[in-house]
Amino acid sequence: MLDRAFDAVVIGANEGARPVGWPLGTATDATVCEPSDLLLDPGAESGVVIAYTEDRYEYGVESLLLRLIADVAMSDGLPMYHGWIV
């Protein structure tokens, strides 16, 4: 995906997912962002980024995840209308 369509792939997960994220991060040479490192500037990121949040979020709550990671407030439409695939 990175060499054909995207400059960056941001994987958002809560801190409880760290055991799953470590192998993925190692395999992709990902940049790891701690909750204190958020908000991300999507235009400044490249490669694979794993962004951990402190908050837990329910499956399907893409708007909360985007707000926590990149301060994107989706009031209408789908994430892809705002430049994100969730």
Image (tube, rainbow, N blue to C red):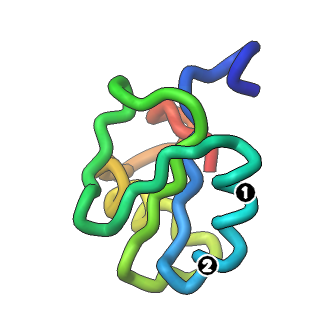
Rendered position, 20 above or below 73: below
Q: Residue at x 76, y 48 (%)?
A: 27
For the question of whether residue 78 can be seen, the reply is no
| Between 42 and 86, the one nearer to me in the picture | 42
Q: Residue at x 75, y 14 (%)?
A: 4
Q: Which mark is residue 24?
A: 1
Question: Hey, what amino acid is under mark 2?
Answer: Ala
- Label 1 CA crowd tier, 10 Å (few <14, some 14–19, many 20+): some
Where disc 1 sits, the SS reads helix
- Label 2 CA crowd tier, 10 Å (few <14, some 14–19, many 20+): few
Q: Which mark is residue 84?
A: none
Image quadrant occupied by the N terminus: top right
For the question of whether residue 55 can be seen, the reply is yes
| Between 80 and 12, the one nearer to me in the picture | 12
- The x, y position of residue 43, in whole percent, is 36, 24
| Between 59 and 20, the one nearer to me in the picture | 20
- The x, y position of residue 31, in whole percent, is 49, 45
Q: Which residue carries the number 2 mark?
A: 17
> Badges 2 and 1: C-beta atoms under 8 Å apart?
no
Where disc 2 sits, the SS reads helix
Q: Mark 2 or mark 1: which comes first in sequence?
A: 2
Rendered position, 84 above or below 69: above
Question: Hey, what amino acid is under mark 1?
Answer: Leu
Q: Residue at x 50, y 76 (%)?
A: 14
For the view shown, which residue lies furthest in the top direction?
A: 4
